[in-house]
Image (cartoon, grey):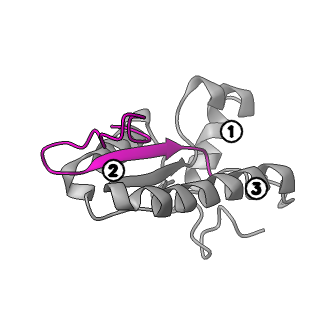
Amino acid sequence: MAAAPPASGDTGCSTHGNTRSASFFPTNGQWNKQGHALAHYAASKAGVNGFIRAAALELAADRITVNGVEPGMIRTPAMDNLGDADVNAAIARGIPLGRLGEPGDIAAAMLFLASDAAAYITGQTIVVDGGATLPESSAVMP
């Protein structure tokens, strides 16, 4: 995986002629549980999305793909900051798939984007959140 071709002018492409890059940034900046927008956080994430799209356009001629992964509520030590097991269970109930994500869910998306199976995908962001950001989801509806 490479973010940009080496300075020598060699594209560093594999035998398949493609190099892939993926970014990682969380989705949960859109709304907090009280339904208040977190404008500063959402703006930074929109900036990352814009960067992914611009980099994808700039690097496409070198057959380098650039994509992103936006994780939702993932079971990590940081979840302890939100509360105890009851709080985490309540959060999981609000996710359409009915569970918190696991680190492996994010790793699988990253591995897919880095694989030859994603050779024709560029400038995109995969949201890995169990459906929590779907407009109809109770996780985003106030």
Of labels 2 and 1, the one closer to you: 2
Magenta stretch encompasses residue 14: yes
Residue 56 tag number: none
What are the residue bounds of the magenta stretch? 1-27
Of labels 3 and 1, the one closer to you: 3
> Which residue is tagged 2?
113
Residue 42 tag number: 3
Question: Which of the two discs, 2 and 1, labels the residue nearer the N terminus?
Answer: 1
**SS category of the residue bearing label 1:** helix
Give the quadrant of the C terminus: bottom right
Q: Is 81 displayed left or right of 20 in the figure?
A: right
Q: Is 37 displayed left or right of 125 in the figure?
A: right
Q: Quadrant of residue 36?
A: bottom right
- Tell me where residue 30 appears, x and y as whole percent: 73, 58
Marks 2 and 1, how far apart in space? 32 Å
Please give the name of the residue rendered at 30% of the width and 40% of the height, measured from the top-left corner: 10
Q: Please tell me how many numbered marks the rendered image carries.
A: 3
**SS category of the residue bearing label 3:** helix
Residue found farthest to the bottom: 136
Q: Quadrant of residue 25?
A: top right
Residue found farthest to the top: 77
Which class describes the residues within 10 Å of circle 2: few (<14), some (14-19), or many (20+)?
A: many
Chief SS of the magenta region: loop
Which sits in the foreground, 51 or 26? 51
Question: Which of the two discs, 3 and 1, labels the residue nearer the N terminus?
Answer: 3
Question: Which of the two discs, 3 and 2, labels the residue nearer the N terminus?
Answer: 3
Give the quadrant of the N terminus: top left
Please give the name of the residue rendered at 52% of the width and 55% of the height, measured from the top-left corner: 55
Please state which amino acid type lies under the numbered disc 2: Leu
Residue 87 tag number: 1
